[in-house]
Amino acid sequence: YHKWCNKNKSMSMLLEDVQERKLAAMANVKQGTLDKHVQEVTPTEQVVLHLDKLFREATVEWLISTNQPIQAIDHPSFKKMIDVASRATKGV
């Protein structure tokens, strides 16, 4: 079989020959890295300017436009809703 493969320029598919080629290929393989492309990002403090003022204005507008009592902003369910909304990552 080996003589025939050599004569016909064919690859041997015997188990031992396949395993030998596989081991030879694995010995020549080098894992690439992303080290040149990856950069460490230093976290920066995110300062939100005028957020309290903007929130207060939006709350007052909501109270007036929906005819809510001022005590509505002290209600636990309102506070829970604001807490949940503050964690939203893609907007509310």
Image (cartoon, rainbow, N blue to C red):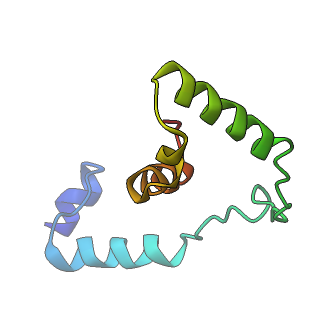
Depth order, front residue of 69/3: 69
Residue 75 location, x and y as percent?
A: 44, 54
Q: Eyeballing the image, is 73 above or below 2?
A: above
Indicate the quadrant where residue 57 lies.
top right
Task: Tally the marks.
Answer: 0
Residue 88 location, x and y as percent?
A: 51, 47
Residue 44 location, x and y as percent?
A: 86, 61
Judge whether residue 15 can be spotted in this image: yes
The quarter of the rendered structure image containing the N terminus is: bottom left
* Residue sitting at the far top: 65
Residue 81 location, x and y as percent?
A: 43, 50
User: Left or right of 50: which side holds 6?
Assistant: left
User: Left or right of 92: which side holds 55?
Assistant: right
Q: Residue visible at 34% across and 72% down? A: 22
User: Left or right of 49: which side holds 32?
Assistant: left
Judge whether residue 88 can be spotted in this image: no
Q: Eyeballing the image, is 20 above or below 81?
A: below
Q: Residue visible at 86% across and 44% down? A: 49
Indicate the quadrant where residue 38 lies.
bottom right
Q: Residue visible at 53% across and 36% down? A: 91
